[in-house]
Image: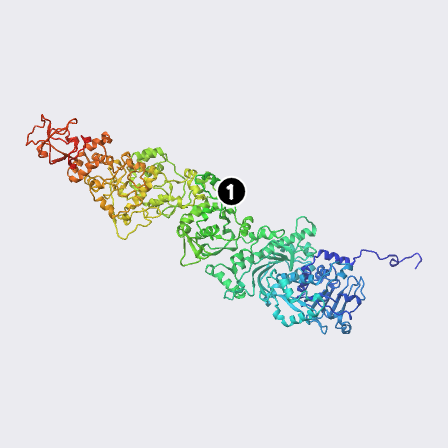
């Protein structure tokens, strides 16, 4: 070679980028946080290798250091973590594990391994400086620092030996290999498995390490295993092969490790193993497509793999390891190494599973040891955009597999749970504190916000802590994000849908409510899964909630669209059935205990305020109901229970679901506002049809507390179901009050007519319901004019309504349609059916009345609303009392003008045309008046009755004396009603068995304080007398009273205060109940003036001659008693009319020379200024004028005469002043 010729090899020196192995590992560890992620990588690799068993052991032993391969290895003979799996390394595995960030899984495994010895394996350097393992016939040590193993250097930082070929080496360095002698590894044969050993980095090693300056103590290692145990059961869900995970402790001096915990698939089978490993086929197809650049094998349809996975996790109790425990404790006590007791069986039980464990495994000999979980797993290959994306030629290099699935925890129970005697422990659901996680075959440290776990062949970040997502990326990043989203929408969502369908089949509603097909499916599932069933509450917890974080919210947004037509919601309506989402009605949020409205007069303010406060809730439910309304129900019955029971009774497909699911269905747009049971929905529902079950039969509500907890006094509206002790009945009336309160929510007073018209929810006194309708207004002047013509108020209103207010047409209609009107009144009087039209005639309002009025007018109960039955302070009470209500709707306060028409609904129809009605009633021994009927009953809470009238009953549908007493006691405090009753219906009961109109011309006298002779006189002359004790609150007739009535005139005469005006209207009435002031304008009082005016009215009605004849034929003692009654008070107190009336009565004894009056005698004339003169007898001299001033005197009364007829008769002379005989007294005032 020439001197100036230089070779490339000689001229070019080594130069280029190099990677420091320790630095590279350190960077990996920074991206892979410590914790259970380290173990997840190990179990993932085991699963990729097809291992069924995975074991962890905390080895507390200190192995010998005298026979190690080099002095640098002695420091790694202390405590370590052992990780075993039942699969052997393949040649490709040995090659792959030597690469950092460039494993051979994609190049040589055909894509079937999800993370086999890639970057993740290097996370073990968090724990150790020198990872080492044995598999098959090979032992491997890694020494990144190249300072501990003999013969290593940075270019080759590790060693592997074939121990079968080098058995002498095993014998030469026994201490070096002692740490591998576990789980069947004895170095005598090929080890059928893989055992990793990670000596814990000590503080001294950490101080000089170029990988990590953080040491790991035994306590920290124990915590790592405890944390892993918490997640062990969920790690098995999406693995392809691993079935058992076990945790051990190897104490110092122990000959073998002690098992502390295991979690295993408890229902393994060939079919299940095929289902779990099905993904391997899919991955291999994707790998083949990538290698051949041929996508024909991908995207061909959809394949599913769904199965039930039962996982049992248990703590191995100390009793099962008694001999080993004794050995461990003995050795530990003798040892000077305090670390040997760090993780004894008892300490591990207490620390790892002492009540705080998510797997809920106990910590003491008396606590639970087993936890059984039942999961349903749904997997799918292919579907939607993901399937199409995976076969795009430009992305085949990514080897995307459209595989994903979900797993839901259906039940979790402990082995000592009481099975109730049915042997069905799987049905006992514990409180499942569940947080959905994202998986890429193993759980990621990502919470999805979903109530189940989501697995997928996701594109992960390099540290496997999250999946790619976001819209702010380009290139492969954008593609990876798009891929993950498509997996969630197109593969996960269908899996989720199938899972919910299966869960619905397992859900317990009532076996009698299921279809035959559903029963068969459940029977099949029960036989396969130990009669597993779900409660409806647990089932609904499986639905996705709103508010999931990105990218998992893609599942929420697509799920409800995907399942819209699936029958996955349960309703009790129609006997119970599963319905699709689009049919469901949601209850929404029903509040309770809202604002009260204590002032009936301040109704407008309350209603307006309630409307504004409730408007914002209309979209989600019903606002808080007033506490007064809720107080009508037992405390344990909530508004939502009441409303749901009502709607279900009416066969509304209502679903009782948690509020979170309700919110999810609404926010996703799956269910619109028209399917939410808001006030508006309730109003529309009950306007459609009036004969709903809830409004005709009442409802039954399940009872969740002992029956004796029902409050006293609730029996009137709520009664126990005698046949079903777990339910109570709610009356129709109480339902209507509740519903009306609900319907009033959100309605402003200006919209009463528009929003409320048509609701059949008015609770009427007769027990039926009335319909709210727009008010049909009439001109009151026109009504009054027709009334003046003799038509009733109701008939006048009806005529004007039918004729649009035209008075002339109304008059013609009234004359032409009297017969039809009467027929309509009888057939449709507002009482017959639910939703009565109200009032006496169509168009009349319903009247709000008091409790007293409701009892009195029960016969017209179809026209009345008892406002006192509705709590004061409730929204309904305010509504009924509001003037805005009466201005728009057919509801108003009961007015005096309406009373006569309402009485017309009560009294016998034959009384309507009659002035004097015959009144049939009798005494019937043993009978007692009860509530009900047209006239109500003797409710002693409201009416005090007299013992003598207690047994009066109805005869021929006539009102009893008791009813009349109730009527007039009411009128006593409502005097403004009396004028409207005048000259209308016969309403004044008499002792003569008649009922007469309230009219002065009827000459009715209140006679209960008069003496028997006076009462006899009134009877003889035909003067009707008011029913005795009509206004008495309570009158007890004693034997002494009867004797007093039978005594003479003087003793039985009523005493009067001479200082009181004789027109005092109340001086003879019991002070507790006073007649109305207007009463005495129609009925005459039992005093001198009253009797005189009554007789005058009688004379005007029947004629003076007839009355005189009746007086003349009356017994003398009757006439004498009446004359003496009139003379008890000074005559000058009578006015001219009253004196004139008295003068016309033939009740005065007369003396006359006229033979027709009998024998006459002369008497001396008495002059006022003279003394009495002698009386002389004239034997028959007809001369009546004697010079000496003497007159004839009749010693024997010959006749009774009236002063008006005879005081100018020449043949009759009257005694001027009292004589010696009282019977002959005629006061001077009458002369």
In this rendering, is residue 584 above or below 230?
above
Point out the image quarter for the N terminus: bottom right
Q: Is residue 89 visible?
A: no
Locate residue 251: give its quadrant.
bottom right
Going by the picture, which residue comes out furthest to the front? 1171
**Depth check, front residue: 120 or 340:** 340
List x then y, in percent, for residue 409. 57, 60
- Left or right? Give the position of 534 relative to 7: left
* Tally of numbered tags: 1
Locate residue 208: give its quadrant.
bottom right
Going by the picture, which residue comes out furthest to the top? 1187
Going by the picture, which residue comes out furthest to the right? 3
Residue at 47 percent of width and 44 percent of height:
596
- Left or right? Give the position of 311 relative to 88: left
List x then y, in percent, for residue 56. 67, 65
List x then y, in percent, for residue 757. 42, 42
Colour scheme used in the picture? rainbow
Locate residue 26: give its quadrant.
bottom right
Point out the image quarter for the C terminus: top left
**Depth check, front residue: 753 or 711:** 711
Local crowd at mark 1 within 10 Å, few (<14), some, or many (≥20)?
A: few
Is label 1 in a helix, a strand or a loop?
A: helix
Q: Is residue 260 visible?
A: yes
List x then y, in percent, for residue 253. 70, 71
In the picture of the structure, the residue carrying the numbered disc 1 is: 613
- Left or right? Give the position of 663 relative to 1132: right
In this rendering, is residue 297 above or below 885?
below
């Amino acid at each position: 070679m020439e001197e100036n010729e230089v070779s490339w090899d000689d001229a070019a020196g080594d130069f280029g980028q190099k990677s420091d192995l320790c630095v590279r590992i350190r960077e990996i560890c920074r991206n892979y946080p410590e914790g259970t992620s380290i173990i997840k990588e190990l179990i993932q690799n085991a699963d990729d290798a097809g291992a069924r068993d995975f074991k962890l052991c905390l080895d507390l032993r200190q192995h010998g250091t005298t026979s190690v391969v080099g002095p640098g290895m002695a420091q790694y003979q202390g405590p370590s973590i052992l990780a075993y799996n039942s699969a052997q390394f393949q040649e490709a595995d040995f090659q792959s594990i030597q690469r950092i960030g460039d494993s051979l899984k994609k190049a040589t495994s055909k894509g079937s391994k999800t993370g086999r010895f890639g970057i993740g394996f290097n996370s073990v350097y968090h724990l150790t400086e020198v990872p080492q393992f044995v598999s098959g016939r090979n032992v491997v040590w890694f020494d990144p620092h190249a300072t501990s193993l003999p013969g290593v250097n940075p270019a080759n930082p590790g060693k592997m030996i074939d121990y079968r070929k080098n058995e002498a080496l095993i014998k030469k360095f026994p201490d070096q290999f002692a740490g591998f002698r576990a789980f069947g590894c004895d170095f005598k044969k090929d080890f059928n498995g893989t055992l990793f050993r990670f000596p814990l980095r000590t503080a001294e090693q950490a101080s000089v390490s170029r990988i990590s300056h953080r040491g790991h103590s035994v306590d920290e290692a124990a915590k790592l295993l405890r944390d892993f145990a918490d997640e062990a059961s969920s790690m098995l869900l999406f693995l392809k092969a691993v079935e058992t995970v076990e945790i051990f402790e190897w104490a110092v001096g122990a000959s073998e490790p002690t098992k502390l915990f295991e979690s295993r698939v408890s229902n393994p089978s060939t079919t299940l193993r095929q289902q779990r490993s099905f993904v391997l086929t899919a991955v291999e197809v994707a790998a083949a497509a990538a290698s051949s650049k041929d996508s024909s094998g991908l995207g061909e349809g959809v394949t599913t793999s769904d199965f039930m996975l039962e996982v049992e996790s248990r703590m191995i109790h100390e009793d099962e390891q008694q001999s080993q425990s004794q050995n461990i404790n003995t050795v530990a006590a003798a040892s000077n190494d305090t670390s040997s007791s760090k993780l004894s069986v008892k300490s591990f039980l207490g620390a790892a599973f002492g009540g705080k464990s998510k797997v809920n495994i106990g910590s003491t000999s008396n606590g639970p040891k087993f936890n059984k979980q039942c999961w349903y797993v749904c997997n799918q290959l292919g579907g939607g955009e993901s399937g199409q994306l995976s076969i795009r030629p430009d992305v085949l290099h990514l080897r995307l597999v459209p595989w994903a699935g979900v797993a839901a925890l259906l039940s979790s129970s402990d082995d000592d749970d009481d099975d109730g005697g049915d042997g069905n422990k799987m049905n006992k659901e514990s409180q499942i504190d569940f947080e959905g996680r994202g998986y890429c075959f193993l759980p990621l440290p990502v919470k999805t916000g979903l109530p189940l776990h989501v697995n997928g062949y996701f594109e992960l970040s390099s540290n496997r802590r999250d999946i790619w997502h976001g819209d702010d990326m380009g290139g492969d990043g954008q593609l990876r994000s798009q891929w993950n989203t498509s997996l969630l929408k197109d593969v996960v969502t269908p899996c989720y849908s199938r899972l919910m369908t299966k869960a619905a089949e397992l859900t317990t509603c009532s076996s009698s409510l299921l279809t035959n097909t559903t029963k068969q499916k459940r029977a099949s599932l029960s036989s396969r899964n130990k009669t597993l069933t779900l409660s409806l509450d647990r089932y609904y917890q499986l639905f996705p909630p709103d508010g999931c974080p990105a990218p998992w919210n893609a599942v929420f947004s697509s799920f409800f669209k995907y399942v819209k037509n699936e029958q996955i919601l349960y309703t009790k309506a129609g006997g119970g059935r599963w319905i699709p989402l689009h049919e469901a009605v949601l209850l929404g949020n029903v509040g309770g205990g809202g604002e009260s409205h204590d002032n009936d007069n301040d109704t407008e303010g309350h209603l307006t305020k309630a409307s504004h406060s409730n408007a914002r809730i209309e979209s989600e439910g019903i606002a808080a109901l007033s506490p007064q309304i809720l107080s009508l129900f037992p405390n344990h019955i909530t508004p939502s229970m009441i409303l749901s029971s009502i709607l279900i009774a009416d066969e509304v497909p209502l679903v009782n679901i948690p509020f979170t699911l309700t919110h999810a269905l609404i926010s996703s747009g799956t269910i619109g506002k028209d399917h939410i049971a808001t006030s508006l929905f309730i109003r529309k529902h009950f306007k459609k049809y009036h004969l709903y079950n809830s409004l005709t039969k009442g409802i039954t509500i399940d009872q969740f507390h002992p029956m004796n907890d029902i409050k006293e006094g609730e029996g009137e509206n709520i009664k126990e179901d005698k046949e079903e002790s777990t339910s109570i009945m709610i009356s129709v009336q109480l339902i209507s009050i509740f519903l009306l309160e609900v319907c009033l929510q959100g309605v402003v007073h200006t919209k009463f007519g528009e929003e409320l018209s048509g609701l059949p929810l008015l609770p009427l006194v007769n027990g039926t319901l009335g319909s709210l309708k727009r008010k049909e207004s009439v001109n009151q002047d026109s009504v009054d004019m027709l009334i003046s013509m003799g038509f009733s108020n109701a008939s006048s209103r009806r005529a004007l309504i039918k004729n649009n207010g035209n008075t002339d047409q109304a008059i013609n209609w009234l004359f032409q349609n009297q017969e039809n009107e009467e027929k309509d009144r009888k057939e449709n009087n507002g009482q017959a059916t639910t939703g009565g039209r109200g009032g006496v005639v169509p168009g009349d309002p319903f009247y709000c009345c008091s409790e007293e009025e409701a009892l009195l007018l029960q016969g017209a109960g179809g026209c009345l609303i008892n406002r006192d039955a509705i709590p004061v302070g409730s929204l309904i009470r305010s509504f009924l009392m509001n003037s805005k209500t009466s201005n728009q709707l057919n509801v108003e306060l009961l007015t005096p003008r309406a009373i006569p028409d309402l009485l017309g609904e009560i009294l016998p129809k034959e009384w309507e045309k009659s002035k004097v009605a015959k009144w049939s009633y009798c005494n019937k021994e043993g009978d007692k008046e009860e509530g009900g009927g047209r006239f109500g009953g003797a409710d002693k809470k409201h009416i005090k009755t007299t013992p003598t009238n207690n047994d009066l009953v109805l005869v021929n549908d006539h009102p009893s004396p008791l009813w009349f007493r109730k009527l007039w006691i009411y009128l006593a405090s409502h005097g403004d009603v009396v004028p409207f009753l005048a000259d209308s219906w016969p309403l004044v009961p008499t002792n003569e068995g008649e009922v007469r109109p309230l009219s002065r011309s009827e000459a009715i006298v209140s006679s209960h304080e008069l003496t028997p002779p006076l009462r006899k006189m009134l009877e003889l002359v035909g003067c009707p007398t008011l029913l005795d004790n009509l206004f008495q609150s309570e009158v007890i007739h004693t034997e002494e009273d009867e004797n007093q009535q039978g005594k003479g005139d003087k003793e039985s005469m009523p005493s009067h205060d001479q200082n009181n005006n004789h027109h005092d209207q109340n001086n003879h009435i019991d002070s507790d109940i006073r007649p109305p002031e207007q009463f005495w304008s129609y009925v005459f009082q039992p005093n001198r003036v009253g009797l005189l005016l009554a007789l005058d009215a009688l004379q005007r009605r029947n004629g003076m001659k007839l009355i005189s004849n009746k007086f003349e034929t009356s017994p003398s003692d009757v006439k004498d008693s009446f004359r003496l009654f009139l003379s008890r008070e000074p005559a000058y107190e009578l006015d001219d009319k009253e004196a004139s009336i008295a003068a016309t009565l033939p009740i005065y004894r007369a003396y006359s020379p006229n033979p027709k009056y009998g024998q006459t005698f002369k008497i001396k004339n008495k002059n006022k200024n003279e003394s009495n003169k002698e009386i002389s007898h004239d034997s028959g001299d007809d001369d009546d004028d004697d010079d000496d001033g003497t007159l004839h005197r009749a010693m024997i009364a010959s006749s009774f005469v009236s002063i008006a007829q005879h005081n100018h008769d020449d043949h009759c002379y009257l005694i001027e002043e009292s004589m010696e005989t009282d019977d002959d007294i005629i006061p001077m005032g009458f002369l």
